[in-house]
Amino acid sequence: MSRSQNQNQRSPPDDAAIGITERVSSSEFSWSEPVVPEAPAVSEDDKAALTELLGPEAAESFLNLYSSSFIPNTLAGRKGPSASSPTINDKALRSKIHQEVRRIFNSALDTTTNNDGAIVATIMPKKGGSRGGGNNGASGGIGRRGDGGGGRSSNFRQIDCPGTGDYLHFNVYKMNRDTMEAAAQIAKQLNLKPQMIQYAGTKDRRAVTVQRCSVRRRKPHELDRLNSRLYDICIGDFSYNPEPAHLGMLAGNEFTIALKGCSFSNDAQLSTADKVSRLDLNINAALAHMHENGWINYFGHQRFGTFAIGTHDIGRMILSGDIKAAIDGLLWYDDALANRLDSSDCPIERSIKDEVMRSWACRIFRQTANAEEALRRLPRRYGAETTIIRHLSQNPTDYMGAILRITRGLRTMYLHAYQSYVWNHAASKRWVLYGNKVVAGDLVYDASAQQSKTGGNGTSANREVELDQDGEEVLNASRDTNIGDEDDDQSLYARLVTPEEAANNTFSIFDVVLPTPGFDTLLPANEIGDFYRSFMKQYGGIDPDNMVRPQREFSLAGRYRRVMTKFLAPPSGFVKACADEMEQLAPTDLDLIKEKLKQKIANETTATAEVTTMDMNSSADTKNEGDPLESKKRPRSSSDLDPSIEKKVKVDESGKAVTPEAEGEKNSIAAVVKFQLAKSAYATVALRELMGVPLAVTEGV
């Protein structure tokens, strides 16, 4: 497979450079009638959690207040009762209490912090009417809001949408934009801050993706009407839920990937049909082997960035205390790109325009310290560079202050990238030394520690589990390195494999984990533990046994990650010959919905109407070249789901794309693979294992 690339464009590093060296080998709505909620009971586990956070007396007062909130007319024109906690000086603990109270009581209680640092709970106001009686005649129900308005706090739900709770969940179909960009566009249309749109994981820009998102206290029609305003984004499949979507809540991701321009070595003598047959056998055999044996669970290239100085390099500099070098790395620029802005005879491609502007702005600032001119040209998307330039323009030598001014999520990303870099190298070294054999001193997850007060590494079994920006489990995470992701509901620990367990084959390779370096993780008690120490000393002068830093948020707790991974379900693949490498080989979810709607309408029409429709479509087919509906790459709104419009992409009964016969010889071979991966696994790493090519090549698939 090959792809063209401008010589000035950034490219990912080679596999070996980041430690990857080894291989193992909107839908139709079907809404139900609304269910009027009763006063839900608080579970014993939630009561215990509340008691642990607030103390017995305050927890009891919160529970009593919650019970009183379901008494009719509790808030009928007067100030309601309240309950308060003791003074709490820990800001992070107060934030957790606010979140837990909202979760446990399904947002029936509103909490604030008073001047003394105590949490004060009151019954959530109901501006649209009392809980009892009302037009709906259901005691304890949610009153309907008439056309005249009423408060969103009590009447935000749409009665014909399934589910209960404050959060409206919905699917987002997007193309050529990442999750954060899509969320920002949706939030802007709703007059919300981007962080109010929550999601279970980030999806890549270079793909057509569908994911579940949520927003608090909104109606489906408010989001459905955005379909006419958003380009390459569609929204649908609504339901209410007591909990928001959050990172880590998904089980995994399903991928459908087209591999084009496939070839074998020494296949010049084979006919196209023979190539298709041979590749079909090989690719399905390889998928079956991967499903059975798995592959090394490397962190993918997107973890490390594409600048000459990667995100892991920035993390290494921060952890080694060379903050000035980290700042210089973040303001690194490509002279060749910057020069293109000064050259009138060298046009700038749209795809790299922002990168050209960034390099020019960083060069201007580093050479002249002209912050005003640099910021005038620097695109807004480069938040870290903007923050650093602004800070250094006022405090030229305060490098630590500049780093700390960067958003916490970005700072954490740099540190996690360094941890991932070390992990990749350690995983490769382990495979070289031991392969798929479990040996004494390996680390495995310790399920028994979850039931005890302390785990295999001496930490509390009740400690919070952090998820990083990719939704991956961060074991024994420090509160200071948490980047705001929701906690996972499972506590995991690791312990050492004993010589007896290794001899008896008690564990398989899929039980083995390796740590990302941190103060709260164990190192393997074998040659791999020694490798961590020597490798980190060589690369950054960092000691894995001393990961505490003067700045608390730079003190990394570490986590464990499985050495091996495999598909969550049996994968599938098919191969075909095509004449045009730009041909769409697999239908998107939107294509499937359109085809389904089209078939539904076709089944409901009369014979006469069918003849008329066929005549119209036949006429339209002769004018597709000039038809603006046919020339659009993607619909702009849900109204484009009109199945009467003939589209270029059709699907057969098996869901495979069926395209018009292309002119010319079909001598290009393409394969389409479909598989499911756990939330922390990288599709590009799976493709590297499947294709037997360097991982960087798969970045362009």
Image (cartoon, rainbow, N blue to C red):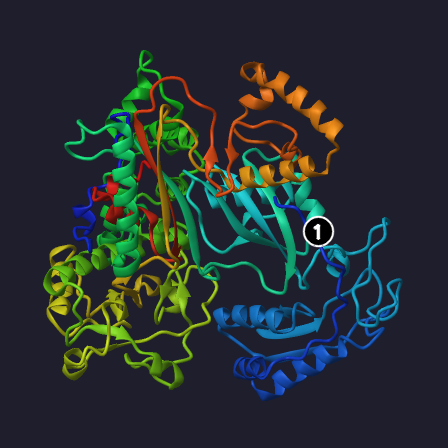
Q: Position of residue 158 (x, y in %)?
A: 74, 54
- Specify the quadrant that holds the C terminus: top left
Circle 1 Cα neighbour tier, 10 Å, few/some/many (<14 / 14–19 / ≥20): many
Residue at the limit of the structure toward the top, as seen here: 345
Task: List x then y, in percent, for residue 477.
Answer: 36, 68
Residue that protrudes farthest toward the front in the picture: 607
- Secondary structure under the numbered disc 1 in the rendered image: loop
Q: Is residue 83 left or right of residue 202?
A: right
Between residue 219 and residue 22, name the one nearer to us. 22
Decide if residue 388 is in sight here: no
In this rendering, the answer to whether 545 lies above or below 284 is below
Residue 186, position as x, y percentages in the image: 59, 43
Name which residue lies at 85% across and 71% down. Answer: 132
Q: Is residue 78 left or right of residue 638?
A: right
Count of number-bearing discs: 1
Instruction: Quickly name the residue at label 1.
Output: 219
Q: Amino acid at mark 1?
A: Lys
Give residue 522's quadrant in the image: bottom left
At x 64%, y 52%, the residue is 238
| Front residue of 40 and 271 | 271
| Residue at 18 percent of width and 71 percent of height | 438
Residue 554 position (above or below residue 523): above
At 45% from the left and 68% from the top, the residue drawn is 488
User: Would you say 438 lies left or right of 354 here?
Assistant: left
The residue sitting at the bottom extreme is: 56
